[in-house]
């Protein structure tokens, strides 16, 4: 069914923190959307435009639609975690962000400082929290967090000092649990019991986690696995059955049912035109 989501600008198509594995390839391709991707905790070979190069940790890429892109993880090096965001934005919005309108894609790549990474993660986590929730005026909240993130990128690109115009950071131990939940996306066997084993204070921690994100770690894990399915649907040519297996579903129809419940569309329909559908 078509979305009843009001028209918002910018509009988020996909957002997620995606752990990657060694020797994984996303070959040259283009997207219909602008994209932001931060690489942390590892490195890979990246392709942007017509160039390939080694990406260092904490490198941020801003890639406009229809610009060729790709990544090639080495079998020997630690692969990165990808903080990825695909979106559409109007020309009018970009008029106020001139440094994000560079014609040369190589000028849209930045090595972030530790402070900038903290700012990025703070805004990104807030955006993900809204994306996964059913809070009132959710589409506008998602759009607002993205606008704040784009403003920060414009400041970094223009070499101006970033003012702390973002909310207070999520508590470090809550953010650590959030990142562990993200790492579990590619390990379907990991469950609530595993999180309790890793975090001795898990019972109290999960209450603060729910207060910060509006859902439990287990609910967030399910939502992130669906987001990872969206990532694979858009960024790869994997068949639906293969994506289901990667997410731990033994049967394709079980994955399709879970995906439809969360997104309001079957995986195949969403792959064709994701902008028509939003989470229920």
Image (spheres, rainbow, N blue to C red):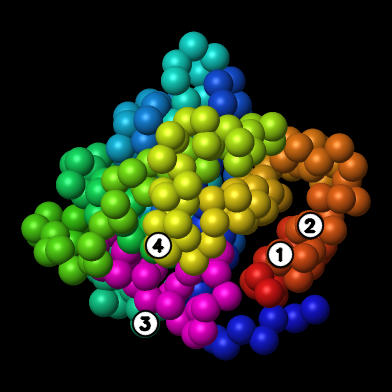
State whether residue 272 appears in this view: no
Name the residue carrying label 4. 212
Horizontal and vertical percent position of residue 235: 63, 46
**Mark 3: which secondary structure?**
helix
Disc 2 to disc 1: CB gap under 8 Å: yes
Distance between the alpha carbons at the discs numbered 3 and 1: 32 Å
Front: mark 4 or 1: 4
Q: Give whichever of discs 3 and 4 has the lower sequence position.
A: 3
In this rendering, the answer to whether 264 lies above or below 188 is below
Q: Position of residue 90 (x, y in %)?
A: 44, 78
Q: Which residues are magenta?
A: 129-153
Neighbour tally class for label 1: few under 14, some 14-19, many 20 plus, Cα within 10 Å: some
User: Could you tell me which residue is drawn at 32 percent across and 39 percent down?
Assistant: 59
Neighbour tally class for label 4: few under 14, some 14-19, many 20 plus, Cα within 10 Å = some
Name the residue: 30% across, 69% down: 148
Q: Secondary structure at mark 4?
A: helix
Identify the secondary structure beneath mark 1. Answer: helix
Residue shown at the point (81%, 41%) measured from the top left = 249
The label on residue 258 is: 2
Secondary structure of the magenta portion, mostly?
A: helix
Q: Earlier in the sequence, mark 3 or mark 1?
A: 3
Q: Which residue is mark 3?
A: 92
- Indicate whether 82 appears above or below 52: below
Q: State the separation of the CA atoms marked 3 and 4.
A: 33 Å
Q: For marks 4 and 1, give the CA distance.
A: 21 Å
Mark identifier at residue 137: none
Residue denoted by label 1: 262
Q: Is residue 2 magenta?
A: no
Counting residues from the start of the chain, the first of labels 3 and 2 encountered is 3
Quote the CA–CA distance across marks 3 and 2.
37 Å
């Amino acid at each position: 069914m078509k979305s009843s989501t009001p028209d918002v600008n910018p509009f988020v198509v996909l957002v997620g923190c995606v752990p990657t594995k060694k020797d994984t390839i996303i070959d040259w391709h283009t997207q219909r959307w602008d994209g932001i991707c931060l690489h942390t905790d590892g490195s890979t070979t990246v392709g942007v435009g017509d160039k390939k190069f080694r990406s260092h940790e904490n490198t941020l890429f801003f890639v406009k639609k229809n610009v060729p892109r790709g990544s090639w993880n080495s079998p020997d090096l630690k692969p990165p975690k990808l903080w990825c965001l695909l979106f559409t934005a109007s020309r009018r919005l970009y008029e106020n962000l001139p440094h994000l309108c560079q014609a040369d894609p190589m000028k849209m790549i930045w090595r972030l400082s530790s402070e900038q990474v903290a700012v990025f993660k703070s805004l990104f986590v807030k955006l993900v929290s809204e994306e996964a929730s059913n809070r009132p005026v959710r589409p506008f909240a998602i759009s607002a967090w993205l606008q704040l993130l784009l403003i920060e990128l414009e400041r970094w690109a223009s070499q101006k000092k970033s003012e702390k115009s973002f909310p207070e950071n999520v508590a470090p131990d809550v953010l650590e649990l959030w990142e562990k939940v993200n790492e579990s996306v590619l390990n379907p066997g990991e469950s609530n019991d595993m999180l309790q084993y890793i975090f001795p204070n898990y019972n109290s921690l999960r209450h603060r986690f729910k207060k910060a994100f509006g859902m439990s770690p287990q609910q967030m894990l399910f939502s992130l696995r669906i987001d990872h399915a969206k990532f694979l649907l858009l960024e790869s040519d994997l068949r639906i059955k293969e994506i289901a297996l990667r997410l731990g579903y033994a049967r394709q129809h079980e994955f399709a049912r879970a995906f439809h419940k969360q997104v309001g569309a079957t995986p195949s329909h969403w792959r064709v035109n994701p902008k028509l559908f939003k989470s229920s």
